[in-house]
Amino acid sequence: MKFNKKSKIFGMFVLGAVLLLTSAFADIALGSGYYNLKTSIKTTAAELTDGVDNFSVDLIATAKVDGKVFAESISNIKYDINKQAIEISGTDLQKGKTIENYSYHDENQRIYKNFEDGSYSVIERHKSRKNDHKIIENPFEEEQAIDAETIMDALVGGLENLIQIEETDNKKIYIGNISDKEIPSLVNAISSFVFKYSLLDEWTVERLNIPSPKSNIYVKEASGKAIENEEGILESSIFTASMSAKDSKGIEHIYTVEFSIDIKDINSTLVSAPNLDGKEVNYTKEGYEFDEKFIGQYKSNIVEVEGNSFVKRGERIIEITSVANGNLKGSYYEVYDDGYETNSLGSFEFSSNYDESEHYTIINYRNSKGEMKQGVMHRSNMQDLYVSFGVEIDGDGRGYRSDISDDSFTSEFVRVFE
């Protein structure tokens, strides 16, 4: 399953810490415990992506240094598989500041609330993405997950009977605890490397204002508890992992991650878009590159090499005359110095249709032979353009090739200011 990551730094830390914790549990959850738990995780992912209509998730992730919380995320996430809708509300804590967040997504739109002024942003999804958008996916169907599972199985060592499985009221309860003396050296070595260079690198610790782990890094302890209901779904899970590390001054610190997830209200969750009546709302469309401020003239020099010098022979000019709802209109022409002419594209008018591509702006024009052609226009820097004419769009719409081979033609067009 994929959960929306509202904070990249904190999200990466939590994800990595959970992976470290999972690696540790690969060794404690042996025998029937390991494989039963793995089967339960797979069953949960399959049911929540394809077997139910809707459900809710309560998620809490907390990161601490020496017992002091430096980052925390609390979320309630509602999924509607049939409507392909997701509603997320919660808070993020970083560096002592709590930030509220709210968003709603479906196949037609994305809605975000700005808690500073109470306004909303509504982004209309691009037509090409409608009906081709899955709100939640099963990670175990992806190649990376299959490879990760193989590695996980290979890491299972000789520890046994360190996990307890209890059954009560038709539910299974998985309980496991492990200390630093019981964690295999290979798991500790991998965990230490990932912890130092991926999770808490220099940039991250500086942003979060926490001690940087430098040496003597090892998993101190890990514990977890998961409850599987009668349908084989893990309805509640709690994990904790702690690592010890010394900073640049040789001072030891304990880094801890606590992670809990509760899956509830299966087939009884209501997901609905917020009522925007009377609210301040800003409407945009997904993938818009251009708006009215790009109306104007853009030039590109026509240059030749003469001897050992660059010589300007003229200018290629693009004029954008109007932009409305992501669609633009304009013209292209060339101006040459006296006595000089290169492989001219001629002059023509062009227009774009926002719905043609979500990846770039496709412009349509008729060349000097009367043939319909296409070009691609991008924003370049803050105010300039990158334009390719005579392009062939790849079948998936993600790439293109230009049939123009004139060495004097550059795709960079610079905004002209009077």
Image (cartoon, helix red, strand yellow):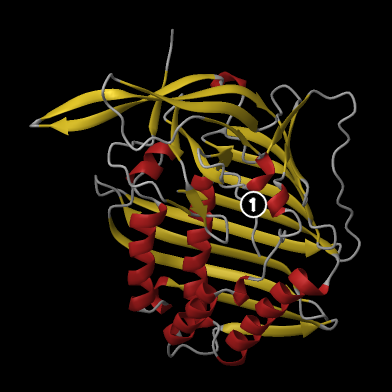
Q: Across the whole image, how many numbered discs are drawn on residues?
A: 1
Residue farthest toward the top in the current orientation of the protein: 418
The C terminus, quarter of image: top left
- The structure residue drawn at horizontal position 85% and vertical position 81%, both measured from the top left corner, is 169
Residue 236 is situated, as x and y percent measured from the top left of the image, at 73, 67
Q: Nearer the viewer, residue 347 or 272?
A: 347
Residue 254 is situated, as x and y percent measured from the top left of the image, at 42, 54
Task: Say what secondary structure mark 1 lies in.
Answer: loop
Instruction: Give the residue type at disc 1.
Output: Asn
Q: Can residue 68 be seen in this view?
A: no
Residue 187 is situated, as x and y percent measured from the top left of the image, at 39, 75
Left/right placement of residue 263 relative to residue 386 reads right
- The structure residue drawn at horizontal position 66% and vertical position 65%, both measured from the top left corner, is 1
Residue where numbered disc 1 is placed: 4
- The structure residue drawn at horizontal position 66% and vertical position 33%, both measured from the top left corner, is 327
Q: Which of 418 and 267 is in front in this view?
A: 418
